[in-house]
Image (cartoon, helix red, strand yellow):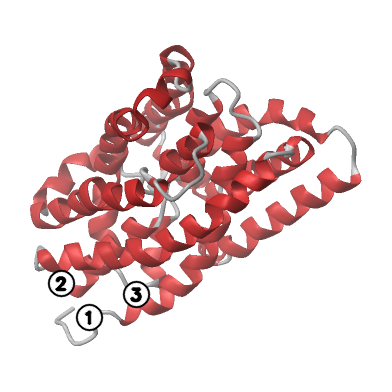
Protein backbone atom coordinates (compact mmCIF):
# COMPACT_ATOMS: atom_id res chain seq x y z
CA UNK A 1 0.00 0.00 0.00
CA UNK A 2 2.81 2.40 0.87
CA UNK A 3 4.53 1.77 -2.47
CA UNK A 4 1.25 2.41 -4.30
CA UNK A 5 0.69 5.69 -2.47
CA UNK A 6 4.24 6.87 -3.20
CA UNK A 7 4.04 5.92 -6.90
CA UNK A 8 0.76 7.80 -7.30
CA UNK A 9 1.55 10.69 -4.96
CA UNK A 10 1.78 13.33 -7.68
CA UNK A 11 -1.76 12.62 -8.87
CA UNK A 12 -3.00 12.41 -5.27
CA UNK A 13 -1.59 15.88 -4.59
CA UNK A 14 -3.12 17.33 -7.75
CA UNK A 15 -6.46 15.77 -6.77
CA UNK A 16 -6.20 17.39 -3.33
CA UNK A 17 -5.54 20.79 -4.93
CA UNK A 18 -8.48 20.30 -7.31
CA UNK A 19 -10.81 19.31 -4.45
CA UNK A 20 -9.68 22.29 -2.36
CA UNK A 21 -10.31 24.62 -5.29
CA UNK A 22 -13.73 23.11 -6.00
CA UNK A 23 -14.75 23.42 -2.34
CA UNK A 24 -13.61 27.04 -2.14
CA UNK A 25 -15.60 27.91 -5.26
CA UNK A 26 -18.76 26.02 -4.23
CA UNK A 27 -18.91 26.77 -0.51
CA UNK A 28 -18.68 30.23 1.11
CA UNK A 29 -16.30 31.09 3.96
CA UNK A 30 -13.83 28.24 3.50
CA UNK A 31 -11.15 30.61 4.77
CA UNK A 32 -12.18 29.31 8.21
CA UNK A 33 -10.33 26.10 7.33
CA UNK A 34 -7.11 28.03 7.93
CA UNK A 35 -7.45 27.13 11.63
CA UNK A 36 -6.91 23.48 10.70
CA UNK A 37 -3.74 24.14 8.69
CA UNK A 38 -1.37 24.34 11.67
CA UNK A 39 -2.34 21.02 13.33
CA UNK A 40 -2.42 19.33 9.91
CA UNK A 41 1.07 20.67 9.18
CA UNK A 42 2.34 19.47 12.55
CA UNK A 43 1.02 15.96 11.88
CA UNK A 44 2.38 15.96 8.33
CA UNK A 45 5.84 16.97 9.53
CA UNK A 46 5.76 14.37 12.32
CA UNK A 47 4.96 11.47 9.98
CA UNK A 48 7.42 12.85 7.41
CA UNK A 49 10.22 12.99 9.97
CA UNK A 50 9.34 9.42 10.99
CA UNK A 51 10.54 8.32 7.54
CA UNK A 52 13.90 10.07 7.99
CA UNK A 53 16.59 7.84 9.59
CA UNK A 54 17.34 10.27 12.41
CA UNK A 55 19.46 7.77 14.34
CA UNK A 56 21.70 7.37 11.30
CA UNK A 57 22.69 11.01 10.94
CA UNK A 58 26.34 9.99 11.38
CA UNK A 59 26.09 7.63 8.41
CA UNK A 60 26.05 10.59 6.05
CA UNK A 61 29.62 11.44 7.01
CA UNK A 62 30.84 8.05 5.77
CA UNK A 63 30.26 9.31 2.22
CA UNK A 64 32.04 12.63 2.50
CA UNK A 65 32.44 13.22 -1.23
CA UNK A 66 28.72 12.82 -1.83
CA UNK A 67 27.84 14.96 1.19
CA UNK A 68 30.27 17.67 0.06
CA UNK A 69 28.72 17.72 -3.42
CA UNK A 70 25.18 17.77 -1.98
CA UNK A 71 25.90 20.64 0.41
CA UNK A 72 27.89 22.60 -2.19
CA UNK A 73 25.07 22.37 -4.71
CA UNK A 74 22.25 23.17 -2.27
CA UNK A 75 23.90 25.83 -0.13
CA UNK A 76 26.38 27.56 -2.45
CA UNK A 77 25.42 27.23 -6.12
CA UNK A 78 21.63 26.99 -5.74
CA UNK A 79 21.47 30.09 -3.48
CA UNK A 80 23.41 32.00 -6.14
CA UNK A 81 20.80 30.92 -8.71
CA UNK A 82 17.97 31.85 -6.34
CA UNK A 83 19.46 35.27 -5.68
CA UNK A 84 19.72 35.93 -9.42
CA UNK A 85 16.14 34.79 -10.02
CA UNK A 86 14.80 36.83 -7.11
CA UNK A 87 16.29 39.96 -8.68
CA UNK A 88 13.93 39.37 -11.61
CA UNK A 89 10.86 39.35 -9.36
CA UNK A 90 8.72 42.46 -8.86
CA UNK A 91 10.00 44.70 -6.08
CA UNK A 92 7.50 43.44 -3.53
CA UNK A 93 9.20 42.39 -0.30
CA UNK A 94 6.56 39.79 0.69
CA UNK A 95 6.65 38.20 -2.76
CA UNK A 96 10.44 38.00 -2.73
CA UNK A 97 10.36 36.57 0.77
CA UNK A 98 8.07 33.75 -0.38
CA UNK A 99 10.24 32.97 -3.38
CA UNK A 100 13.39 32.92 -1.27
CA UNK A 101 11.91 30.83 1.53
CA UNK A 102 10.74 28.07 -0.78
CA UNK A 103 13.69 27.99 -3.20
CA UNK A 104 16.45 28.12 -0.56
CA UNK A 105 15.28 24.98 1.27
CA UNK A 106 16.01 21.54 -0.25
CA UNK A 107 13.36 18.84 0.10
CA UNK A 108 13.69 16.20 2.81
CA UNK A 109 10.69 13.99 2.09
CA UNK A 110 9.18 13.09 -1.29
CA UNK A 111 12.48 13.77 -3.08
CA UNK A 112 13.46 10.25 -1.99
CA UNK A 113 10.59 8.68 -3.93
CA UNK A 114 11.16 10.74 -7.06
CA UNK A 115 14.91 10.14 -6.92
CA UNK A 116 14.27 6.40 -6.68
CA UNK A 117 12.03 6.54 -9.74
CA UNK A 118 14.78 8.49 -11.53
CA UNK A 119 17.43 5.81 -10.88
CA UNK A 120 19.34 7.88 -8.32
CA UNK A 121 21.28 6.42 -5.40
CA UNK A 122 18.64 6.97 -2.73
CA UNK A 123 20.78 5.21 -0.11
CA UNK A 124 23.21 8.14 -0.15
CA UNK A 125 20.44 10.71 -0.26
CA UNK A 126 18.45 9.12 2.57
CA UNK A 127 21.48 9.07 4.90
CA UNK A 128 22.05 12.78 4.18
CA UNK A 129 18.48 13.97 4.81
CA UNK A 130 18.99 14.84 8.52
CA UNK A 131 22.06 16.90 7.61
CA UNK A 132 20.07 18.74 4.92
CA UNK A 133 17.34 19.57 7.43
CA UNK A 134 19.71 20.91 10.08
CA UNK A 135 21.81 22.96 7.65
CA UNK A 136 18.87 24.57 5.86
CA UNK A 137 17.17 25.59 9.10
CA UNK A 138 20.45 27.12 10.31
CA UNK A 139 21.18 28.97 7.06
CA UNK A 140 17.69 30.11 6.00
CA UNK A 141 17.60 33.17 8.33
CA UNK A 142 21.11 34.10 7.19
CA UNK A 143 20.21 33.91 3.50
CA UNK A 144 16.98 35.88 4.02
CA UNK A 145 18.84 38.66 5.82
CA UNK A 146 21.60 38.81 3.19
CA UNK A 147 19.30 38.61 0.14
CA UNK A 148 16.52 40.89 1.41
CA UNK A 149 18.66 43.29 3.43
CA UNK A 150 16.65 46.00 5.14
CA UNK A 151 13.45 44.65 3.55
CA UNK A 152 13.54 41.64 5.86
CA UNK A 153 13.45 43.77 9.01
CA UNK A 154 9.76 44.53 8.76
CA UNK A 155 8.76 41.07 7.57
CA UNK A 156 10.52 38.56 9.78
CA UNK A 157 9.81 38.81 13.48
CA UNK A 158 12.04 36.54 15.56
CA UNK A 159 9.33 35.66 18.10
CA UNK A 160 6.68 34.13 15.80
CA UNK A 161 9.37 32.59 13.59
CA UNK A 162 11.04 30.87 16.56
CA UNK A 163 7.63 29.79 17.93
CA UNK A 164 6.71 28.18 14.61
CA UNK A 165 10.13 26.59 14.31
CA UNK A 166 9.88 25.14 17.84
CA UNK A 167 6.34 23.74 17.63
CA UNK A 168 6.17 22.79 13.97
CA UNK A 169 9.75 21.67 13.28
CA UNK A 170 11.62 20.88 16.51
CA UNK A 171 8.78 19.21 18.44
CA UNK A 172 7.61 16.92 15.60
CA UNK A 173 11.27 16.08 14.94
CA UNK A 174 11.91 15.14 18.59
CA UNK A 175 8.66 13.19 18.76
CA UNK A 176 9.54 11.32 15.58
CA UNK A 177 12.97 10.45 16.97
CA UNK A 178 11.38 9.19 20.18
CA UNK A 179 8.86 7.02 18.34
CA UNK A 180 11.59 5.64 16.08
CA UNK A 181 13.65 4.65 19.12
CA UNK A 182 10.90 3.35 21.42
CA UNK A 183 8.06 2.27 19.12
CA UNK A 184 9.56 1.12 15.81
CA UNK A 185 6.39 -0.83 14.93
CA UNK A 186 4.29 2.29 15.31
CA UNK A 187 6.76 4.16 13.12
CA UNK A 188 6.39 1.45 10.47
CA UNK A 189 2.59 1.62 10.56
CA UNK A 190 2.67 5.40 10.25
CA UNK A 191 4.77 4.95 7.12
CA UNK A 192 1.44 4.95 5.26
CA UNK A 193 0.59 8.45 6.50
CA UNK A 194 2.96 10.95 4.78
CA UNK A 195 1.23 11.02 1.38
CA UNK A 196 -2.34 11.35 2.76
CA UNK A 197 -1.14 13.89 5.34
CA UNK A 198 0.57 15.98 2.65
CA UNK A 199 -2.56 15.79 0.48
CA UNK A 200 -4.65 16.99 3.44
CA UNK A 201 -2.36 19.97 3.98
CA UNK A 202 -2.52 20.92 0.30
CA UNK A 203 -6.32 20.61 0.38
CA UNK A 204 -6.64 22.83 3.48
CA UNK A 205 -4.13 25.44 2.27
CA UNK A 206 -5.80 25.78 -1.13
CA UNK A 207 -9.36 25.77 0.22
CA UNK A 208 -8.57 28.39 2.89
CA UNK A 209 -6.41 30.60 0.64
CA UNK A 210 -8.57 30.92 -2.48
CA UNK A 211 -11.36 33.00 -0.82
CA UNK A 212 -8.83 35.62 0.28
CA UNK A 213 -6.54 35.31 -2.71
CA UNK A 214 -7.16 38.78 -4.08
CA UNK A 215 -3.84 40.40 -4.97
CA UNK A 216 -2.01 37.13 -4.26
CA UNK A 217 -3.12 35.79 -7.63
CA UNK A 218 -0.94 38.37 -9.33
CA UNK A 219 1.95 37.59 -7.00
CA UNK A 220 1.67 33.87 -7.71
CA UNK A 221 1.58 34.46 -11.46
CA UNK A 222 4.59 36.77 -11.32
CA UNK A 223 6.55 34.06 -9.49
CA UNK A 224 5.56 31.40 -12.03
CA UNK A 225 8.27 32.06 -14.68
CA UNK A 226 10.93 32.18 -11.95
CA UNK A 227 9.84 28.77 -10.71
CA UNK A 228 9.93 27.37 -14.23
CA UNK A 229 13.43 28.77 -14.70
CA UNK A 230 14.50 27.24 -11.40
CA UNK A 231 13.00 23.87 -12.31
CA UNK A 232 15.05 23.84 -15.53
CA UNK A 233 18.36 25.16 -14.19
CA UNK A 234 18.60 23.72 -10.66
CA UNK A 235 18.96 20.01 -11.55
CA UNK A 236 21.53 20.94 -14.20
CA UNK A 237 23.53 22.78 -11.54
CA UNK A 238 23.21 19.81 -9.22
CA UNK A 239 24.40 17.38 -11.89
CA UNK A 240 27.35 19.62 -12.84
CA UNK A 241 28.34 20.01 -9.18
CA UNK A 242 28.22 16.24 -8.65
CA UNK A 243 30.40 15.64 -11.69
CA UNK A 244 32.82 18.26 -10.39
CA UNK A 245 33.15 16.08 -7.29
CA UNK A 246 33.53 13.01 -9.55
CA UNK A 247 30.50 11.18 -8.24
CA UNK A 248 29.22 8.14 -10.06
CA UNK A 249 25.98 8.43 -12.00
CA UNK A 250 23.69 7.24 -9.20
CA UNK A 251 25.08 9.73 -6.71
CA UNK A 252 25.13 12.52 -9.29
CA UNK A 253 21.46 11.90 -10.09
CA UNK A 254 20.66 12.12 -6.36
CA UNK A 255 22.34 15.54 -6.16
CA UNK A 256 20.44 16.66 -9.27
CA UNK A 257 17.10 15.61 -7.76
CA UNK A 258 17.91 17.29 -4.45
CA UNK A 259 18.92 20.51 -6.20
CA UNK A 260 15.67 20.68 -8.15
CA UNK A 261 13.25 19.63 -5.38
CA UNK A 262 12.33 22.12 -2.68
CA UNK A 263 10.93 21.92 0.85
CA UNK A 264 7.72 23.86 0.26
CA UNK A 265 5.43 22.20 2.79
CA UNK A 266 8.06 22.01 5.54
CA UNK A 267 8.84 25.71 5.17
CA UNK A 268 5.14 26.66 4.98
CA UNK A 269 4.62 26.86 8.77
CA UNK A 270 7.60 29.19 9.03
CA UNK A 271 6.14 31.33 6.26
CA UNK A 272 2.77 31.47 8.01
CA UNK A 273 4.48 32.88 11.11
CA UNK A 274 5.33 36.06 9.19
CA UNK A 275 2.93 38.92 10.03
CA UNK A 276 0.56 39.51 7.12
CA UNK A 277 1.68 36.29 5.40
CA UNK A 278 -1.82 35.38 4.17
CA UNK A 279 -2.62 35.29 1.33
CA UNK A 280 0.61 36.09 -0.53
CA UNK A 281 3.11 33.72 1.09
CA UNK A 282 0.97 30.55 0.99
CA UNK A 283 -0.10 31.35 -2.57
CA UNK A 284 3.49 31.87 -3.71
CA UNK A 285 4.69 28.71 -1.95
CA UNK A 286 1.87 26.47 -3.20
CA UNK A 287 2.47 27.75 -6.75
CA UNK A 288 6.06 26.49 -6.53
CA UNK A 289 4.78 23.10 -5.32
CA UNK A 290 2.52 22.74 -8.36
CA UNK A 291 5.31 23.69 -10.78
CA UNK A 292 7.63 21.26 -9.03
CA UNK A 293 5.22 18.33 -9.18
CA UNK A 294 4.97 18.78 -12.94
CA UNK A 295 8.75 19.10 -13.19
CA UNK A 296 9.27 15.84 -11.30
CA UNK A 297 7.44 14.01 -14.08
CA UNK A 298 10.16 15.26 -16.43
CA UNK A 299 12.99 14.64 -13.97
CA UNK A 300 12.24 10.95 -13.45
CA UNK A 301 12.70 10.43 -17.19
CA UNK A 302 15.39 12.97 -18.10
CA UNK A 303 17.69 12.62 -15.08
CA UNK A 304 17.49 8.83 -15.29
CA UNK A 305 19.18 9.06 -18.70
CA UNK A 306 22.16 11.04 -17.42
CA UNK A 307 25.43 9.16 -17.06
CA UNK A 308 24.17 5.96 -18.62
CA UNK A 309 27.65 5.14 -19.87
CA UNK A 310 29.13 5.30 -16.37
CA UNK A 311 29.78 2.39 -14.05
CA UNK A 312 26.69 2.35 -11.84
Q: Element type at marker 1?
A: loop
- Answer above or below: position of 170 versus 65: above
Q: Element type at marker 3?
A: helix
Q: Which mark is residue 303?
A: 3
Q: Which mark is residue 103?
A: none
| Residue at the (53%, 38%) spot, across then down | 95
Asked if labels 1 and 2 touch by Cβ distance under 8 angstroms, the answer is: yes
- Answer above or below: position of 218 versus 275: below
- Answer above or below: position of 246 versus 309: above
Image spot of residue 118 (x, y percent) = 37, 72
Graded by Cα atoms within 10 Å as few (under 14), some (14 to 19) or many (20 or more), the crowding at tag 3 reads many
Residue holding disc 1: 307
Query: Mark 2 vs mark 1: which is more N-terminal?
Result: 2
Label 2 or label 3, whichever lies nearer to me, is: 3
Q: Nearer the viewer, residue 95 or 70?
A: 95
Separation of residues labelled 2 and 1 (CA atoms): 8 Å
Q: Residue furthest front?
A: 91
Residue 152 left/right relative to 68: right
Image spot of residue 173 (x, y percent) = 39, 30
Q: Is residue 312 something that shows in the picture?
A: yes
Q: Which mark is residue 248?
A: 2
Q: Element type at marker 2?
A: loop
Amino acid sequence: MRDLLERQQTWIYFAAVALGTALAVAVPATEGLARAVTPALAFMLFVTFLQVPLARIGAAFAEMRFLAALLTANFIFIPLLVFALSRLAPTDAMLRLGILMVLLTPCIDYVITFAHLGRADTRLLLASIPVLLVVQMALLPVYLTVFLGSESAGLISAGPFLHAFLWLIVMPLLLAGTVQALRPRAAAVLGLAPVPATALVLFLVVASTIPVLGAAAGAALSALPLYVGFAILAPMIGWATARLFRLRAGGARAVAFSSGTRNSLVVLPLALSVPGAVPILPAVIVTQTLVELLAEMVYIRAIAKLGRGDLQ
